[in-house]
Each structure stands twice: as C-alpha cells, then as structure tokens.
Image: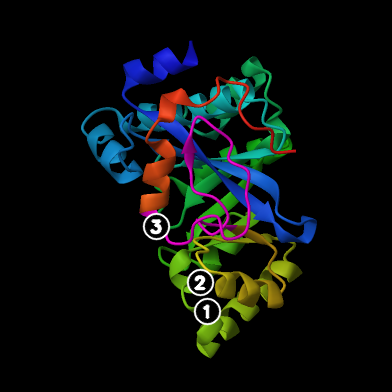
Amino acid sequence: MLEEHCRESKFTIAFQPIVDLSAGTKPYAYEALVRGLNGEAASTVLAAARASDFQAFDAECRKRAVQLAQGLNLSACLSVNISSETVGHAYHGLLSTLDVARSSGFAEEKLIFEISEREAIDDVARAKEQILACKRRGARIAYDDFGVGYSCIAALLEFMPDILKLDMSLIRGIDSDNRRRSIMSAIHDVCSRLHTAVIAEGIETRQEMDALRDLGINLMQGHYFASPVIEYLPLPVANAGGPGGEVELLAIKNKFSHEPAGAVSEA
C-alpha cells in the first residue's frame, strides 16, 4: 500500500544510516531523504514542489518517512528534514509530524528533526514554541548544515539544538588540513560544554573518519559507510563505496525489487 502511494505521489524516501563509531558501526539513526521514483536527486524533487504548496509537500515528506520507517520496523532513531520556512507552521510544522508518529505507532522519542542552517527561519518566536513543544514530547532537534548558512554560533543559543550536524564543506580534506582540524576541535569542545551531540556529514574516506575520531567525534554519516537506498535500511560498513553519486544510483537501480517491507534489520 505504501509503495503504491509513493508511486502516485511521484516521490519516495531513501534512508541513509548515521553511525556510532563508539559502538562499532552500529546505526545511531537513519536520515530520511526525498527522492524521485526514478532516483532523481532531492534538489530536483524539491524544485518541482516549489511550484505548488511547498510547506504541505514538506510535511508530506516527513509523514511518508515516518510511515515507511514504521513499516520497515526501524528500531534506531529516524532523522527527518524540515525546511526553515515550515518549522513553526500551524498545520505543517514540527508538531504535525509528531502527530503522524503517534497515529502510526512510531515512538515520538525516536524522532530527530533536522532544521537546515542554509536558510533563515521566518518566524523565530513561533519556531521556538514548536521546538520546545517537540522537546516536551521527547523528540530531538538537530541543526543541519552547520557552518555554511545563517546565524551559526548564534543558533546554538537561540534554538538550543540537541544535535549539531557539521556540513561536509568543513569535513572535506580534514585529515590533511590543520586549520580545519583546529576549527573542528573548537566546535566539538563548545558542543561538549553545551551537552550538544555532534554529527559529521559527508564522510567519504578512511582518512576523514580517522581524523574526526581522533578529535572525539564518533557520530558520522556518508557514502564511506553506506549510500542512501530507497525504502530500505542499508546496514553501514566501513568503506562501503567511497565517493558518492554512482554508488547511490547503483543502489536504487532496482528500487522496487528489494525484499518487501521486512527490509534489513539494523540491530
């Protein structure tokens, strides 16, 4: 039923693990990523959605992710993206997804909302209200793309995220760049003092992984561990494929011929 609904809506959801190296490569969470039915990138799907009611589409993506995760028996956390313009929306904001989780039987405390740092939040006061309400219900807030957009450090004070996701532009080449390592060490130190978890995105090499682990960062995500796979929970393994897009295209080539909804257990 979910698969048919995805086809009708012209988009579906891929899942990519976030690993916890302090527990081997055990999945800490899976990020839900929107994709076209033929493997079109998120940017293509989102650009088309901008032509209509984008906030409603944004909420529908999160709804689909929760329903698929529940159908795949996801035991780890689920990380879903929400656009900055939708965060505080009365009907399509954060709380709408918590209501979907509750009605679907998916534990609200397993939800992580990723708010992108690439765009400014329209209504800060309303967004803060929904963020606080989310936290009261057990969900967590992640600040995504940290280092490339608006506010940066100020956002740590304004929104008090539980998790900071470091943009891959800060990660790339960190193993051979002392300045990047110094910046990353300082960010990690601040987050530790604020009791904010740090996730490094876009890991593509063993050297990047080792450099980050040496700095005390154990939560990571990237093609080095696993590429996103449509409607499936790929198990992370070190050196799964390295640099990116072609690995994902191979993974989604037969996207609807995977084992049916029982998918891979990430336990």
> What segment is highlighted magenta in the picture?
221-245
Tally of marks: 3
Residue, disc 1: 174
Q: Residue at position x 43%, y 45% from top?
A: 123
Residue, disc 2: 171
Q: Please state which of residues 32 and 239 is positioned toward the viewer in this rendering.
A: 239
| Residues at discs 2 and 1 in contact (Cβ within 8 Å) | yes
- Whole-number angstrom distance, CA of label 2 to CA of label 1: 5 Å
Vertical side of 83 occupied by 107: above or below: above
Measured as percent of width and height from the top left, residue 151 is found at 46, 65
Say which amino acid is labelled 2: Ile
Q: Is residue 227 magenta?
A: yes
Q: Residue at position x 61%, y 69% from top?
A: 209
Element type at marker 2? helix
Measured as percent of width and height from the top left, residue 241 is found at 49, 56
Measured as percent of width and height from the top left, residue 230 is found at 46, 33
Q: Please state which of residues 92 and 23 is positioned toward the viewer in this rendering.
A: 23
Q: Nearer the viewer, mark 1 or mark 3?
A: 1
Judge the density around disc 1: few (<14), some (14-19), many (≥20) Cα neighbours within 10 Å.
many
Measured as percent of width and height from the top left, residue 211 is found at 62, 77
Q: Is residue 237 visible?
A: yes
Q: Residue at position x 50%, y 64% from top?
A: 204
Give the overall secondary structure of the magenta segment. loop
Q: Quadrant of residue 197?
A: bottom right
Residue, disc 3: 118
Q: Is residue 100 magenta?
A: no
Q: Quadrant of the C terminus?
A: top right
Element type at marker 1? helix
Say which amino acid is labelled 1: Ile
Judge the density around disc 3: few (<14), some (14-19), many (≥20) Cα neighbours within 10 Å.
some
